[in-house]
């Protein structure tokens, strides 16, 4: 029985709706297993810009630093803060959290539930036995490289982004993938674009060097375009996929469809910092703020709820509790309950809050 502190940053759009259900499930775990989860809420994204003048305030950063883990909803989705002329972008909150807290390894597990195989746009026989994890590098590459700007030149505007990786950045993320593979089915696929990009050629060189230190793990290189194709052609053949920031961003949205919906996929962002309980981490669903369905009780809270399972596992070392959350979700899905994004004939459609209640009930 332990006491854990969690910074809760619900954010914008469906962020607060799904986070509320995740916290509800977390508190159910607390009362069932005798733990204490002290949650402290703060603004982030558009909510923070409007309340505090920045996408994330220094006080909220301090709160996150002091916590054992961070539960994050989603940010963005307001036309006022979108587009090239927006002064402060809500996403800045995420980038600051990841960079300032050195959360360089983003883990995105994808294991479609058997009961949902028909909810995917991909054939059930292709999906069967899919159980993979994407390890996305999170604090380097195109999203952080400088210069990154639109420039006014005598010939008209041009724009530049910089894709830079150091050997050390590649080495540590590839190592994370190999360590994970040791606990799984012992296969790593490194994804790059080494036939075109210099950064990818360095990526491949370092990945191969690290692979040589893990002779017990099967290793392959795959070009990102080829990986995009194989992900929906033979998803069950992958175990651990490791890739750079933007490739991981895009491939995991694609991979979310293996699980039936964006609303199903959790993620954990980890570094090397440890608390007295486990690895410090940031936990968030992979989806965004979904402004098209916000405020309508249509959002699927399962991704957010499954992030709680990842938090219990990685940051608090509470494996039994993590499995209890995952099993509860599977039980509710097996019983035929679905949010609208997973609509199938003959199933019972429920709203965001009801789905959270059902999962909590399945734990209790
Ligand atoms: P999105 O993930 O918000 O939505 C994509 C589609 O998936 C939408 O049709 C949406 O309704 C659906 N969807 C997403 N989550 C769902 C859920 N839990 N249940 C049911 N359906 C769900 O991506 P977008 O529409 O491209 O972006 C909207 C805003 O979110 C943008 O401002 C974008 O910048 C931001 N965004 C934020 C994050 C984040 O906070 N981590 C990630 C991606 C996008």
Image (cartoon, rainbow, N blue to C red):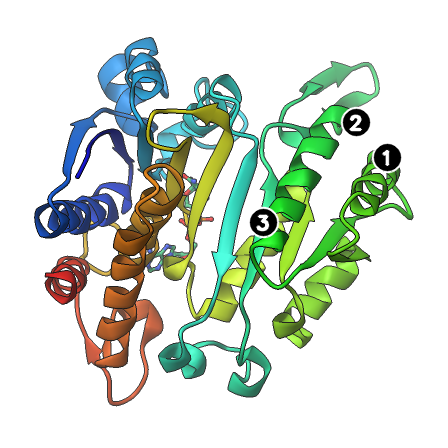
* Quadrant where the image shows the C terminus: bottom left
Q: Secondary structure at mark 3?
A: helix
Q: Residue at x 91, y 48 (%)?
A: 195
Let me know if residue 159 appears in the view.
Answer: no
Q: Nearer the viewer, residue 124 or 52?
A: 124
What percent of the width, then of the height, locates residue 270?
Answer: 49, 34
Numbered circle sitting on residue 135: none
Numbered circle sitting on residue 167: 2
Q: Residue at x 50, y 67 (%)?
A: 257
* Quadrant where the image shows the N terminus: top left
Q: Which residue is mark 1?
A: 202
Q: Is residue 64 above or below residue 316?
A: above
Q: Is mark 1 within 8 Å of ligand 1?
A: no
- Identify the residue at the far right of this view: 195
Q: Nearer the viewer, residue 4 or 151?
A: 4
Numbered circle sitting on residue 180: 3
What percent of the width, then of the height, locates residue 47?
Answer: 26, 27
Q: Residue at x 56, y 36 (%)?
A: 105
- The residue carrying pointer 2 sits among few (fewer than 14), some (14 to 19) or many (20 or more) residues within 10 Å by Cα, namely few
Q: Which quadrant holds residue 84?
A: top right
Q: Are marks 2 and 1 in contact (CB under 8 Å)?
A: yes
What percent of the width, then of the height, locates residue 165?
Answer: 75, 27
Q: Which quadrant holds residue 340?
A: bottom left
Disc 1 to disc 3, C-alpha distance = 22 Å
């Amino acid at each position: 029985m332990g006491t854990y502190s969690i910074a809760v940053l619900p954010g914008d759009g469906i962020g607060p709706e799904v986070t509320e259900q995740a916290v509800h499930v977390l508190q159910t775990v607390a009362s069932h297993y005798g733990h204490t989860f002290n949650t402290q809420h703060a603004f982030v994204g558009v909510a923070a810009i409007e309340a505090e003048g920045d996408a994330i305030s220094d006080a909220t950063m301090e709160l996150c630093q002091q916590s054992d883990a961070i539960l994050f909803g989603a940010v963005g989705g307001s036309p006022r803060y979108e587009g090239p002329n927006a002064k402060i972008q809500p996403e800045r909150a995420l980038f600051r959290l990841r960079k300032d807290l050195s959360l360089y390894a983003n883990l995105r597990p994808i294991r479609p539930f058997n009961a949902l195989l028909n909810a995917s746009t991909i054939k059930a026989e292709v999906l069967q036995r899919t159980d993979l994890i994407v390890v996305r590098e999170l604090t380097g590459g195109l999203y952080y490289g400088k210069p990154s700007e639109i420039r006014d030149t005598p010939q008209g505007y041009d724009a530049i982004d910089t894709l830079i990786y150091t050997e050390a950045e590649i080495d540590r993320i590839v190592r994370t993938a190999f360590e994970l593979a040791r606990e799984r089915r012992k296969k790593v696929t490194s994804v790059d674009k080494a036939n075109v990009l210099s950064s990818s050629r360095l990526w491949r060189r370092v990945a191969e060097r690290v692979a040589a230190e893990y002779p017990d793990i099967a290793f392959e290189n795959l070009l990102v375009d080829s990986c995009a194709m194989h992900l929906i052609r033979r998803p069950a053949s992958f175990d651990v996929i490791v890739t750079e920031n933007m490739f991981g961003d895009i491939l995991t949205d694609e991979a979310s469809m293996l699980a039936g919906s964006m609303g199903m996929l959790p993620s954990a962002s980890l570094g090397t910092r440890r608390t007295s309980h486990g690895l410090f981490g940031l936990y968030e669903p992979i989806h965004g703020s979904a402004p098209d369905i916000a405020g309508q009780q249509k959002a699927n809270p399962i991704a957010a709820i499954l992030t709680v399972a990842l938090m219990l596992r990685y940051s608090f070392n509470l494996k039994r509790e993590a499995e209890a959350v995952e099993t509860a979700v599977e039980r509710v899905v097996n019983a035929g309950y679905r949010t609208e994004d997973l609509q199938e004939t003959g199933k019972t459609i429920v709203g965001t809050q009801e789905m959270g209640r059902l999962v909590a009930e399945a734990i209790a």
